[in-house]
Image (spheres, grey):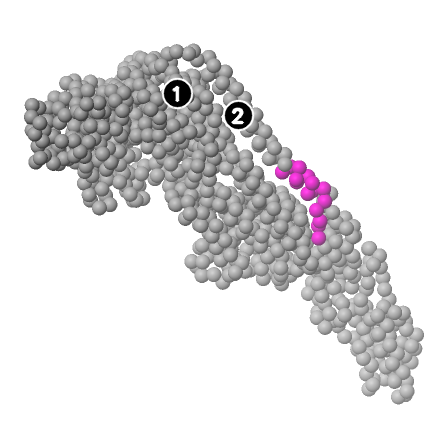
Amino acid sequence: MAMVMMMLRFVVLTAMSDVASGQPGGTSSSGPSGSASKSPSWWVGAISSDLGCSKNAALLLLAGNQTQCSATEIYTGLASVGECVACSSAPKGPGYYCQDNTAVLCPNGHYCPDYLTKAECPKGTWCRAGFVQPEDCSFVISCPQGSEKQLAGPGLLFGLILFLVCICSCSCCFRIRAVREQEHIRDEAAKIQDGAVVLGQGLGQTAYSVAIEFEDVGMKLKSNGLDILSGITGKFPAGSLVALMGPSGGGKTTFMNALCGRASYGTIRGSIKINGKAGSVQDFPKLVGYVPQDDIMHADLTVHQNLYFNAQLRLPAGTSSEQVLEHVNKTIKVLGLEHVAHNLVGSAERRGISGGQKKRVNIGMELAAMPAVIFMDEPTSGLDGAATIQLARCLSELSRSGLTIICVIHQPRWAVFDCFTHLLLLGEGGRMVYSGQAKMSESYFDDTGFRLPPRENPADWMIDIVCGMSPRYQSKSSDDVDAAFAAPHDLFELWDSKCKAQNPYEDSSLVMGEPLSQDRSTPGRLKQTWIFLVRNARQWNKVSFLSTLALLFLCGAVFGLLMTSIATFSYGAMFAMLTGNGFIFFMITTVNSRSVFGFERLQYLREFKSGTSSGAYWLAKITFDLINVFMYSLAYSLPLFWLQPLPAMSYGQYLVVFIMSAWYHSGLGMLFSVTFSSTSASLLLCVFAPMVLQLAFAGTLIKISDMSAGQKALSSISCGRWYNQELYIRELQHFPEHTHKFPEVVKQLASIQADLDDAGVGILNLAILGLLLRIWALIVLALLKYSEGGNCITQLRFVAGKHLRHLGLVVGPSPKPGDVVVATVTRSSSSLHPPRSVQVEPAQIPV
């Protein structure tokens, strides 16, 4: 008996070894692919020496016919001689496979329909770990036999073709349109006859004439309370050409800013009247033109385009495109810019027209708009002698038509000074030395004891007087110098004592008109939006656009190749594999979106001080930027998707997530660029903000489930959180349902506080957040437009007060306390605008 038991033990152990090694004594079967292997889930583990063994059992074991039991039954004969032992780890559900006495996840490149079968993934399908059946590959994807990854196939070629078609289409459409437009402009310009040119004829607008009175106007800086203007009194009749002169620091530009409502840095006192009636210049911005000292215009537009779009936005509503084009061509001819009409204005980085030509374009932008009054800050600076004289004559002709022009000017030559009808001379500290007709200024100083040296320019002589460099004689007949006279203080006292109460050097009459009831009617917001859209298309920088696309494509390709080097897929690493390559895309998109608003800050302020709609500008900008949002997303995601082991989701779903992320981050860049005037500050924020939001608040470093309430609030406005969540959930939805219960998946979903029903939530949140960022940028733009005061509180107060006054409601003090600003203008009934018609000889200036 002992010998039989020993023999049985030897045979059973040998049979077990044979079964484990697949040798005879075990059984095998072929799976669907012909390579499946069946592993025993139960086998004889030991022979008990204290149990009796029937002869039948021993014979069966010796014959090798029963070395394996089924999963649920044990051969009764074996029960008397041994015991069956299960896998050391019990199976946990579908997707597991019993191997080497252990329940393991079905490996990559295979599928396991049950615990006993493992089959290689056939060609045309792909299998990730834990799959119970193969998943079909799309016809645009390559899947060799045993593939755990979807590999790029015809889809990559199709995507590249689509990418190139989009780029070429945008480029060709814009270029063809620009060429046709330029040809049409040249044809229309050729129709203008040589000789006299009439500006403003036939524009169909109501004519306005503006006369300005001011009394005891002063200004105190808000920053330190210093008085920089004091006691300025005078009149500028309608149709006058006024020179504001004085030494540097005399307050010329400050006084002009006070008149036109641009002195937000100071508190104005005194009375300013327009035609003697109640009103405010700021309430009628569309009738006021302002030429800044700096040449503020769009450097990426041509000379003609700068004037044309400005005229379209500011000329009366109903003016046809052909009328606008004719008027702009005449303005260009008057300014002598025909030869550079289609040249880019240029900038310091990109060479364009000369400095003198830029100055004429700067002036032409206001002439093209045909306002009722124009303020010019040093319009002749940077011009040569011939150009200066021609400009002065042009302004003189415009003033004769009824247009009031006020210029800050430094020591003009006699031929230029002779064109001005009125002069306001200021001294140090912003006090008045003379105010009245320009032709009578010489006699005033002669009457007060000053003598004009022979062959001296009167304008230079007057500045010398104010600076104390010209002697004052005790009388006209005496050569004795008045040594006690001290300029400029005694000049101020002399004027106040002789002329402040009754000024004999002013015009005796000042034309008054009916009160101004409404501003000029210009194109509505929808029309302005279209004009801004067309202008954005003309400003499109193809080189910069293509460079950005190339950079994004390269970054996407690099990350895609890095992902290819990851050898093994696992559910624990899937979240990081999907979401770890977005931060560089976020950063590039945010940085590039600064150019939407930030690079046009000064141009924006100039245009919208003139009454154009900030809402139309904003809407056109964000609409045109959708091209960048789509193309940036396509350039980065295309190589990233197709070069890495392909995600289970379709490329369309993958692209949508990137588009919404680009929508969010472009809005973030817009907000930074308009909020911070410093380009370095906005650049640093655009670089680091996306990185911090992605790393710290997207659930990457800190699990969202472990965050505090404040951290979760920041996480909820972070693009990274919704980007990560949307990619992960969309990917899981394309995996078999039983994989959603794997421990790694359940743990990851819990850490980001999401479930599979949240698909689309991330897309919706990114859309809302991107829109809110853009609305925030619009609010900042509006505050910049109404920049009364030095901070946001005073700006908000000004905006609220302005609109409440329009509703007839009484509000608190104006943001400019001390102002008594009243306005009205003379308005003719002629629809042909004869006072605006100007007879001007074309400029003969070498270009």
Where does label 1 land, which residue?
Answer: 845
Please name the amino acid that badge 2 sits on.
Ala
For the point 82% across and 86% down, the residue is: 50
| Element type at mark 2 | helix
Q: In the image, is 402 to the left or to the right of 40?
A: left
Dividing the picture into quadrants, the one containing residue 367 is: top left
Residue 56 is at least partly visible in this image: no
Q: Position of residue 463 (x, y in %)?
A: 21, 30
Using the image as rendered, state which of residue 21 and residue 407 is in the foreground: 407
Q: Judge whether 72 appears above or below 380 on screen.
A: below
Q: Residue 365, relative to residue 691: is it above or below?
A: above
Q: Residues within 10 Å of mark 2 (few under 14, many from 20)?
A: some
Query: Which region is colored magenta?
Result: 149-163
Q: Badge 2 is on which residue? A: 178
- Observer able to see residue 15: yes
Per the model, the C-alpha gap separating discs 2 and 1 is 28 Å
Residue at left offset 81%, top offset 64%: 38
Comparing labels 2 and 1, the label whose residue is closer to the camera? 1
The answer to which quarter of the image holds residue 493 is top left
Q: Looking at the rendering, in which quadrant would you find the C terminus? A: top left
Residue 151 covered by magenta stretch? yes
Rendered location of residue 258, percent (x, y): 24, 33
Which type of secondary structure does the marked residue at label 1 adopt?
Answer: loop
Q: Going from the N terminus, do you reach mark 2 or mark 1 first?
A: 2
Task: Answer above or below: position of 454 versus 721.
Answer: above
- Look at the magenta stretch and give its main secondary structure: helix
The spot of residue 146 in percent (x, y) is 77, 55
Q: Magenta segment: does it hold 452? A: no
* Residue occupying the point 44% across, 35% down: 347
